[in-house]
């Protein structure tokens, strides 16, 4: 069980004083595990087990409650602890079994899960259907306040059929549920009846690692789960996670060998390029950064204003200034999520200031207006501030004056989650299926639709796609939705990052940046030292 602490303790995690010391020990030779296998497979005999892996994360997770978290910073670490019915293969994004060995739609509105046997929680308690039901029920209970409960809105009730069988009765056909559970944003499985206040700081799951200590805003320490049901994994004994917002500190730790693995900016990767002890990987991340507009600010209700703002944005300049060029323009679904997104060169984005000024005049704002925008602080690695600041400079050409308010993460999350803003720059990440991006944002009943966007054609496509079992037909509807949304501009879509990871050369097995960047390959990462 994890212990939430308010002071540093020697021997657990990487303290600030220890940051520039080289840490970690070579492990013993052993057999390989099963899933996920490294892309470049190593012979079983040479994989070294054991050791401590020093990982730098940018943000604190804030909470380990598996049912109501809203911040992306919690996702990576919670996936070390919790699991669900299904999961996404970190390299292919295919939905595959996890705590369920199979699932079957016995009727269009009935989904039966067969659970994996001989699985135990970190506290030794066996995992059964009663636990699965309790977790699903709590995640969907309005009192829990889950921002993602809408994903599972089709679930009418969950019943225990036997010790290892769970039946869900659905309000309507919902062919996408297995993938939604695989995304595991708010339905990680803890022991049934757990005290939510305890889970927030002392999580108990079935995952490959268990939390042993958490010093908020400093570090987390995870120990290998020796009872983990996937025989042979994970390979490493300890994950020591340090929360380091400042990139210069992370770069110093990587150079010194005190940090084994960290995300770095494009500039950071360039600065570290000649470090003989490091190697690098990169790839498009399934997170997209957007500027959200609220209907409470009257000018934003006019599509011509939104179109004018869109025509005034030079996305390439924003990507260059915010990310050092390490990003790509995006549509409503990030290109690379299987074949659902629209490629950047087909999005039709262009800069046309004359047309933008004409639209502003037609909308009754020939001299523009003033508006307040909410952002994370300057210097935050999310790059929200330089993105909105660059856009604000560009909008001056059509008379817009943008006052930027900078909030720390907790305050920013509160404003974002309660839709309390006129304009806000934020992002959205990987979901179980694109419907979980499209419905919240573009359906009239969507939970993250601050503009109150409503288009009857888009609404019909979303509702039809949600019940369409044929993937190719569903894909066609997704593309139609995206094209219409690009015309109506309910959100100002900016960029997805090309993420750069730096790691010590002795880090083996982590040879691919998954599209969702949840770092699940850490389960089969090992240290060749």
Image (tube, grey):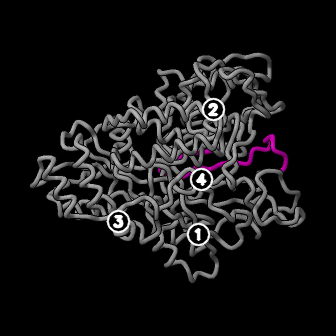
Front label number (1 vs 2): 2
- Dot 1: what SS? strand
In this rendering, would 209 be left or right of 360?
Answer: right
**Is disc 1 surrounded by few (<14), some (14 to 19) or many (20+) residues within 10 Å?**
many
Answer with mark 1 or mark 4, whichever residue precedes in sequence. Answer: 4
Residue 226 falls within the magenta-colored stretch: yes
Q: Which mark is residue 177?
A: 2
Residue occupied by mark 4: 339
Which residue is rendered at x = 19% and y = 53% of the image? 359
Residue 12: percent from left, percent from top = 62, 53
Please report the residue visible at 59 percent of the width from the left and 53 percent of the height from the top: 339
Tell me which residue sits at (74%, 39%) in the image: 98
Callout 2 secondary element = helix
How far separated are the C-alphas under marks 2 and 4? 19 Å
Assess disc 3: are there few (<14), some (14-19) or many (≥20) residues with their C-alpha within 10 Å of its C-alpha.
Answer: many
Q: Which residue is mark 3?
A: 318
Q: Which residue is mark 1?
A: 502
Q: Which residues are magenta?
A: 213-233
In three-dimensional space, the C-alpha distance between marks 3 and 4, rounded to whole angstroms, equals 26 Å
């Amino acid at each position: 069980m994890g212990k939430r602490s308010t002071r540093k303790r020697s021997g657990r995690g990487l303290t600030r004083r220890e940051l520039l010391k080289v840490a970690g020990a070579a492990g013993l030779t052993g057999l390989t595990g099963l899933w996920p296998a490294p892309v470049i497979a190593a012979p079983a005999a040479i994989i070294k087990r054991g050791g401590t892996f020093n990982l730098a994360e940018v943000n604190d997770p804030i909470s380990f409650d598996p049912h109501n978290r809203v911040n992306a910073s919690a996702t990576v670490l919670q996936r070390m602890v919790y699991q669900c019915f299904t999961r996404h293969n970190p390299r292919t994004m295919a939905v595959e079994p996890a705590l369920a060995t199979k699932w079957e739609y016995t009727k269009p509105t009935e989904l039966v899960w067969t659970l994996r046997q001989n699985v135990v929680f970190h506290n030794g308690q066996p995992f059964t259907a009663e636990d699965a039901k309790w977790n699903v029920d709590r995640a969907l209970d309005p009192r829990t306040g889950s921002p993602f409960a809408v994903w599972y809105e089709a679930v009418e009730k969950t019943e225990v059929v036997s010790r290892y069988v769970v039946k869900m009765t659905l309000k309507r056909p919902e062919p996408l549920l297995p993938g939604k559970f695989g995304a595991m944003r708010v339905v990680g499985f803890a022991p049934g009846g757990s005290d939510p206040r305890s889970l927030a700081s002392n999580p108990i799951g079935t995952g490959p690692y268990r939390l042993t200590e958490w010093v908020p805003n400093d570090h987390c320490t995870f120990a290998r789960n020796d009872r983990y049901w996937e025989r042979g994994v994970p390979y490493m004994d300890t994950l020591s996670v340090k929360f380091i917002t400042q990139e210069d500190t992370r770069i110093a730790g990587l150079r010194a060998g005190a940090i084994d693995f960290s995300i770095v900016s494009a500039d950071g990767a360039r600065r570290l390029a000649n470090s003989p002890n490091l190697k690098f990987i990169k790839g498009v991340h399934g997170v997209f950064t957007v500027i959200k507009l609220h209907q409470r600010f009257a000018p934003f209700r006019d599509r011509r204003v939104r179109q004018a703002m869109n025509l005034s944005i030079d996305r390439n300049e924003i990507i260059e200034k915010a990310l050092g060029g390490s990003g790509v323009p995006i549509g409503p679904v990030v290109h690379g999520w299987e074949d659902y997104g629209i490629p950047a060169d087909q999005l039709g984005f262009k800069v046309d200031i004359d047309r933008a000024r004409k639209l502003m005049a037609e909308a009754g704002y020939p001299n523009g207006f003033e508006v307040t925008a909410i952002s994370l602080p300057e210097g935050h690695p999310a790059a929200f501030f330089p993105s909105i600041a660059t856009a604000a400079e560009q909008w001056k050409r059509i008379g817009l004056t943008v006052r930027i308010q900078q909030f720390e993460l907790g305050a920013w999350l509160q404003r974002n989650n309660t839709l309390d803003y006129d304009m806000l720059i934020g992002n959205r990440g990987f979901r179980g299926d694109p419907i979980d991006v499209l419905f919240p944002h573009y359906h009239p009943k969507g939970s993250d639709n601050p503009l109150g966007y409503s288009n009857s054609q888009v609404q019909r496509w979303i509702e039809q796609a949600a019940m369409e079992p044929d993937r190719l037909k569903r894909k066609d509807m997704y593309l139609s939705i995206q094209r219409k949304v690009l015309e109506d501009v309910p959100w100002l879509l900016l960029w997805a990052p090309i993420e750069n990871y730096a790691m010590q050369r002795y880090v083996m097995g982590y040879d691919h940046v998954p599209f969702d960047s949840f770092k699940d390959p850490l389960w089969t990462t090992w240290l060749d030292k």
